[in-house]
Image (cartoon, helix red, strand yellow):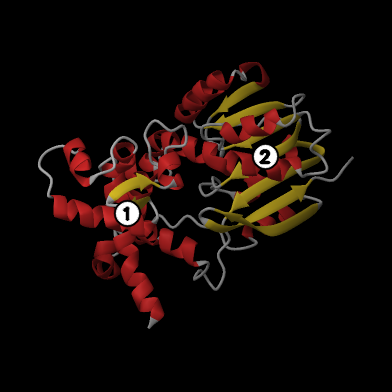
Amino acid sequence: MTPIFEVLQGPVRMAILKAAVEMGMADILAEVSDPKGIAAALPGETDIENLTHFLDSMAGLGLAVKHGGHYLNLAFADTSLRKESPVYLGDMVLNLSRMQHRNIHRIEELVHAGSPPVKKEDRLADESKWQASVKHLTPYQRAGIAALAADTIEALPEFKSASKMMDIGCGPGLMCMEILKRHPAMEGVLFDLPAIISLAEKEVAKEGMGPRISYIKGDYNTTDFGNGYDIIWASHNLYYVKEFSAFFSRLHGALNDGGVFISLHEGTTGEGTAPEHVVLSRLSLALEGQNYVFEKGEIAEHLRRAGFDSVETSPLDLPVGEVELTIARKQRG
């Protein structure tokens, strides 16, 4: 019976987290700790008894700690749920919730009726969707994903001799910048849709890395990649490739001899039934016809067909769960 009770608690956990973000509880608890003071900090009237129940649930979830009737933020909430924090993840939580949960209350309806019309702002392949989402990705990358990307690339034997890299589907560009910080002699190219590059340019300016970074604006299905790269990096952004054979052949051609392409994407197994974190997080999108996902080994197979000399895959643990790291090398001349 254990799986039943674990599943029953899932919506409650999400509801607590979402309410905590929407009410700004982490910011409030940084200033006041007693229920009456917390109530006074909330807009409108507040029922102290129900507020206490909610605060107790925050403590139970690990967002706060209770001592002597007073409540304080725990480390995660203090770091990631306070709006003044450079790694504030509250907006990302709300954005992902809208994506992953908007259809879960109508599963039976959509099973019978099929995929519903999708609003323009909810279409994953739409530029405006990603223009809004990149703002949420910035603190996420800053919170540790950019460092993980840099660790992965720095571990490559080719890293020290590399002089030019491209981050394709770069988003805010923090991953590329973190990699460049580890290699002061390397130049970077950020590639993404025009609206996304305009946001990345602002992040680059904040970091003072403008002289080392250039930009390519466009759709990666049609826009020229340029050439002369020693490293090309792509993380969770190849879902919208239209012709895989042509796309990966173009990547192969853009690399120098001995160059390396690195992909970080999920890889489903069990005929699309695992891993659980991928299947469940994408159900809402899949029900509306937006099932953008790769099978395990799929990207590696495309790379082999495109002429890469060696292709290796390995699992890599991220906060969201295990994903597939694929490293492909172009033959040396």
The Cα–Cα distance between marks 1 and 2, rounded to whole angstroms, is 34 Å
**Residue at image coords 28%, 67%:** 107
Query: x%, y% of residue 144?
Result: 57, 42
Q: What residue is disc 2 on? A: 150
Residue in front for this viewpoint, 263 or 36: 36
Callout 1 crowding tier (Cα within 10 Å): few <14, some 14–19, many ≥20:
many
* Tag 2 secondary structure: helix
Under mark 2, the amino acid is Ala
Query: x%, y% of residue 227?
Result: 72, 30
Q: Which residue extends farthest bottom?
A: 1
Q: Is residue 325 visible?
A: yes
Callout 2 crowding tier (Cα within 10 Å): few <14, some 14–19, many ≥20:
many
Q: Which residue extends farthest left?
A: 45
In the displayed structure, 251 sits above or below 110; it is: above
In the displayed structure, 106 sits above or below 192; it is: below
| Relative side of 35 to 66, left or right | left
| Relative side of 89 to 275, left or right | left
Residue in front for this viewpoint, 16 or 31: 31
In the displayed structure, 115 sits above or below 86; it is: below
Q: Which mark is residue 58?
A: 1
